[in-house]
Image: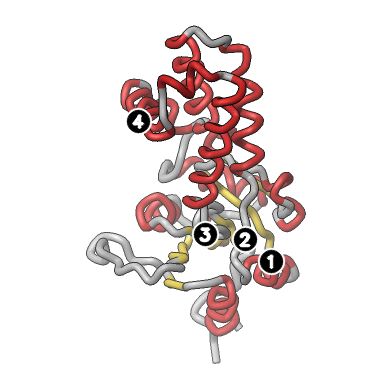
Amino acid sequence: MTSRHPWPKAVLFDLDDTLWPIAPVILEAEKILFAWLTEHAPRVAERFTIATLRQARLELLARRPEFAVDLHALRHAGLVAAFEQVGEDPGKVALAMTEFFAARNAVTPFDDVVPGLLWLQERVLVGSVTNGVADLQTIGLAHHFRASLSAREYGRAKPDPGIFLAGCAALGVAPHEALYVGDDLLLDVQGAQRAGLRAAWMNRTGKVNDLAHEVRPDVEVHSLAQLTGWLEREHA
């Protein structure tokens, strides 16, 4: 029986909410950061709350949309503004950022992730393309990826086709030879497909595709185990 597609030469992944849940990690990291502020920058903690710091970042992003490609710089700038507003030493912001990102990288991959990455490594090139600021080295998964690219490094964010093309180039494959896997229908699935890649929708939470008239993933999966099963069936 002839397969419908040749085997992809590369599989590229989104990270947050595709390989690990991120919302609870960010919430915990912001609590840890606020505890640090309470001890080391008390005037900031007295004037602001976690919620008002978050709102100030959103307002800053609205005024300066270029921060969308560098969430690290956005958070840093937001803290600098808060420190300056209350008369705290903005030189402490670097220490605050170190505290936050240590906690932000304390992610727990879904159970299927490491087995799935090991399976893929034996068959294809594995890479990542992310808008986030996760540090794969700190997380302990960097050795699974031949190449990793972030919006912060590239200068443009998904769904810009350029970042997908740069991810393919980093692995030495053409777009049509790659499969992109991500949880966001617009940023990941539609973005990758418009750049010429095939795209798998990683739908871990059983969402309904409310954009089905506009976005049609090449495959919808709920885990890396389902993804590898699909690859075997469709490309054997």
Residue neighbourhood size for the residue with mark 2, other residues' Cα within 10 Å, grouped as few (<14), some (14–19), many (≥20): some
Closer to viewer: mark 1 or mark 4: 4
Amino acid type assigned to the residue bearing label 1 in the image: Val
Is residue 231 toward the left or the right of residue 44 in the image? right
Badge 3: residue crowd in 10 Å (few <14, some 14–19, many ≥20): many
Residues at discs 2 and 1 in contact (Cβ within 8 Å): yes
Distance between the alpha carbons at the discs numbered 2 and 1: 8 Å
Q: Residue at coordinates 37% horizontally, 22% vertically from top-left? A: 64
**Considering depth in this image, is 18 or 42 the residue closer to the camera?**
42
Callout 4, which amino acid?
Gln
x then y, percent, for residue 228: 59, 76
Disc nearer the start of the sequence (1/4): 4
Q: Secondary structure at mark 4?
A: helix
Where residue 108 sits, quadrant-wise, is bottom right
Q: Residue 131: horizontal and vertical position, in percent?
A: 50, 42
- The reply to whether callout 3 and callout 1 are in contact (CB within 8 Å) is no
Q: What label does residue 219 carry, if any? A: none
* Nearest-to-viewer mark from 4 and 2: 4
Q: Earlier in the sequence, mark 3 or mark 4?
A: 3
* Residue in front for this viewpoint, 202 or 230: 202
User: Is 186 situated above or below 231?
Assistant: above
Name above or below for residue 108 compared with residue 104. Answer: below
Q: Of the residues under marks 2 and 3, which one precedes in the sequence?
A: 3
Question: Mark on residue 18?
Answer: 3
